[in-house]
Amino acid sequence: MLKKEPSAYAQLYFDALLEDVMPFWEKHSLDGEHGGYFTCLDRFGSVYDTDKFLWLQGRQIWMFSKLYNEVHQKQQWIDVAAAGIDFLTKHGQDEQGHYYFSLTRDGRPLTHAYNIYSDCFAALAWYEYGRASGISMAMDKARQAFDNFLVRRSDPKGRFEKSTGVRPQSNFGLGMMTAYLAFEMESLIGEMRAAELYDQCLEEILVKHYDQSSGLIREVVHADGHFLDTFEGRLVSPGHNLEVIWFLMDIANRLGREKLVLRLVDMCLHVLERCWDHEKGGIYYFIDIKGAPSVHLEHDQKLWWVHLEGLIALSRAWLLSGRADVINWFEILHDYVWQRFPDPQYGEWFGYLSRQGEPHLTLKGGKWKGCFHVPRALYECARSLQAEAES
């Protein structure tokens, strides 16, 4: 029997988004002197480092613009997004048009554009801000960043690549991000181009990187798709598995491919069964596909984004299948997450828990955690649960 009706869950997620998480970032992250956003915030919202990371700048622009477009046209939200866009415009790109990884507080480049994901989130930021503002130049910038990403996919690090090429590899993250960008930006790039990219991503993720024996998606395979029996080749990120599953659910649902949707629902539950810590609870950060020792010291920690991507995947699976086993897993994961990650005393959510589920770090933002995974998950879950309540 349901612990809560879908409408009650939806309200809980919306309330946390609008009354806790977004106000935290509105209050603490804006740099009124130099523009853009501070992301290195401690538990109380105080800034402990002023460096700015371009992928997090892009994510925050996208998040505020998305909510402006789809929840409420709140002037403060578009003003926050505009502050990030202005900083991105003045300081974000190198001479080739790629986006730096990190900058000083006042916008001087610290780290070269070695990380292709800066381009990804710049594309999303410009696109969503363009929808919100109606500024045509924003869409031009979005298309440019998207095209740059596609061009760089075959050699994402370029001159910054450290590998010798002796063991050519395919990285699953690139296909995952291509799928997400194409879906989010379909109205800009066109249905035909999006459909081509969907087919490529489905082949890359569900054939090339999918491991039949374990039922999991591998982070790295040989360039030709063969299994690499190395630390990298055996690595599975449960969070990435769950994240790409809901990306592909959205794509499959849009394409009307019901059998693929149901396959993805099964995959979601399998990832949870395989990657759940059945002793302490929660989802492992990393696992080795053959059960070998992990080289990642944090492999058994419980991270915010991993669990949140699981909640999105389950809320989508609930909406698209209505299966009892999906609802049961949603409630198990919901209970684990809501008992441990939110910080009712100072707002927003903890990001890093020990294996036992206690806060390992109390920061609210840093180099990797910003205004993205928590609010996106709260929004996406609320949206799915509300749709389920109305169905």
Image (tube, helix red, strand yellow):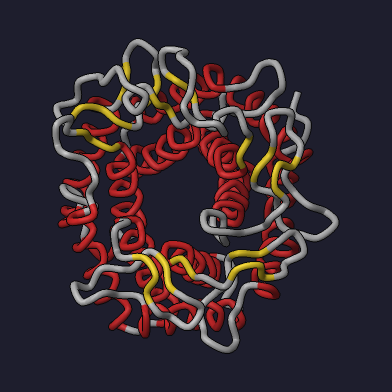
- The image shows residue 102, relative to residue 219, as above or below, that is below
Q: What residue sits 47% from the left and 75% below the top? A: 104
- The image shows residue 310, relative to residue 254, as above or below, that is above
Residue 102 percent across, percent down from the top left: 42, 67
Q: Image quarter for residue 87?
A: bottom left
Front one among 16 and 237: 237
Residue located farthest toward the right when viewing the structure as drawn? 345
Residue 162 seen in the figure: yes
Q: What residue sits 26% from the left and 74% below the top? A: 94
Q: On the picture, is 153 further left or further right than 114?
A: left
Front one among 323 and 37: 37
Which image quadrant: the N terminus? Answer: top right
Residue located farthest toward the bottom when viewing the structure as drawn? 33
Residue 318 seen in the figure: no
Residue 224 percent across, percent down from the top left: 14, 27
Q: What residue sits 24% from the left and 76% below the top? A: 140
Q: What residue sits 26% from the left and 35% below the top? A: 202
Which image quadrant: the C terminus? Answer: top right
Residue 229 percent across, percent down from the top left: 29, 17
Front one among 61 and 332: 61
